[in-house]
Amino acid sequence: MTTSPTPRNGSTWAWRKLRARVLAKSDVCHLCGRPGADEVDHVIPIARGGALLDEANCRPAHRSCNRRKGAKLYVPAPRSSRSSRSTSPTRSSTAKDVGPSRDW
Ligand SMILES: [Zn+2]
C-alpha cells in the first residue's frame, strides 16, 4: 500500500516555521481581536485559492475562533440561562380544559 503522507492542512516544516513566525509577530486573534492566539488562520482559505505559505495570507487566531469561522452551520444554542418563560404552570398548560375565563 502506498499511503502518501501528503499533509492536507500543511503540517510541513515550512508551514510550522511560517506559523511560528506569524504567532511570534502577533498573537492577537484577527477574528475576535483578543490576544492569546494559538493558531494561524488563512484569510483566504486554501480551498478558495488562498496561498498556504504566504505570510500575508496568515493571521493569528484562536483555535476556537477558527473552528467557529470554519463551521458554516453555526446554530446558536438556546440559552438556558434566562428562565423567565420557563415558569409555566403544569396545571392548565396544553390541557384543553374549558376554564371559566374563556370568553374574550
Ligand atoms: Zn479569537
Image (spheres, rainbow, N blue to C red):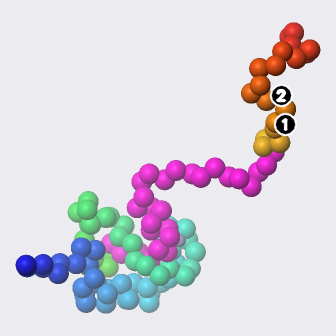
**Residue 14 belongs to magenta span:** no
Instruction: Name the foreground residue: 46 vs 5.
Output: 5
Evaluate if marks 1 and 2 touch, with contact meaning CB atoms under 8 Å apart.
yes
Residue at numbered disc 1:
89
- The amino acid type found where label 2 is placed reads Ser
Residue at numbered disc 2:
92
Q: Is residue 86 above or below residue 103?
A: below
User: What number of labels is visible?
Assistant: 2
- How far from the left and from the top, in percent, is residue 50? 26, 66
Picture residue at 36% right of the left edge, 67% below the top: 43
Residues packed near mark 1 inside 10 Å, few (<14), some (14 to 19) or many (20 plus): few
* Res. 72 mark: none
Query: Which quadrant of the figure has residue 15?
Result: bottom left
In the rendered structure, the answer to whether residue 5 lies left or right of residue 10 reads left
In the rendered structure, the answer to whether residue 21 lies left or right of residue 37 reads left
Q: Which residues, given as a range, are shown in magenta?
A: 57-84
Question: Please, what secondary structure does the residue beneath circle 2 have?
Answer: loop
Picture residue at 42% right of the left edge, 54% below the top: 72
- How far from the left and from the top, in percent, is residue 70? 40, 61
Residues packed near mark 2 inside 10 Å, few (<14), some (14 to 19) or many (20 plus): few
- How far from the left and from the top, in percent, is residue 85? 78, 41
- The amino acid type found where label 1 is placed reads Pro
**Quarter of the C terminus within the rendering:** top right
Disc 2 under 8 Å from ligand 1? The reply is no
Instruction: Name the foreground residue: 47 vs 33.
Output: 47
- How far from the left and from the top, in percent, is residue 34? 58, 75
Residue at the left extreme? 1
